[in-house]
Amino acid sequence: MTQSEQKGRSILTNVLIVLIGQVGCLTLVIILASVLLGLWLDGVFDTKPVITLALLFAGIPVSVLVMLNVGRRTLARLKDNLEKESDISS
């Protein structure tokens, strides 16, 4: 394996690690916001678990959509950077 291939794999590995970290943090923020907002709204309207559960279940598809969006943007940015590097080295 050449040095440029090793560097490319290292960059790809780092990007994937950062992507997984971003997705994990965003998922945590969405779920936590859903629970806190649901608990607050349940306290206001005195509907104990109903709104919290509804927001929690609504947060699942939102979290998936956010993960897909972040993944697509990150991979598109990585592809653009790799294309620029290959154009420069050519």
Image: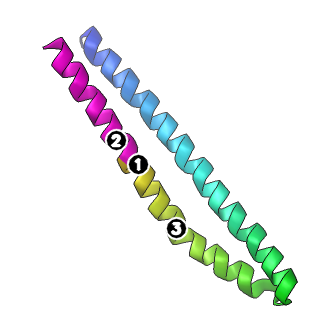
Which quadrant would the C terminus be assigned to in this image? top left
Amino acid type assigned to the residue bearing label 3 in the image: Val
x, y (%) of residue 4?
Answer: 27, 13
Amino acid type assigned to the residue bearing label 1 in the image: Gly
Residue at 60% in and 77% down: 57
Q: Which mark is residue 71?
A: 1
Q: Which mark is residue 75?
A: 2
Residue 83 counted in the magenta span? yes
Q: Is residue 69 left or right of residue 43?
A: left
x, y (%) of residue 71?
Answer: 41, 48
SS at circle 3: helix
Q: Quarter-wise, where is residue 74 in the image? A: top left
Q: Main secondary structure of the magenta part?
A: helix
Q: Which residue is mark 3?
A: 62
Q: Is residue 81 above or below residue 74?
A: above
Q: Gap between marks 3 and 2, in whole Å? A: 20 Å
Q: Which residues are magenta?
A: 73-90
Give neighbour class at mark 1: few <14, some 14-19, many 20+ (Cα, 10 Å).
Answer: some
- Work out whether mark 3 precedes mark 2 in sequence or the reverse, and give the earlier one: 3
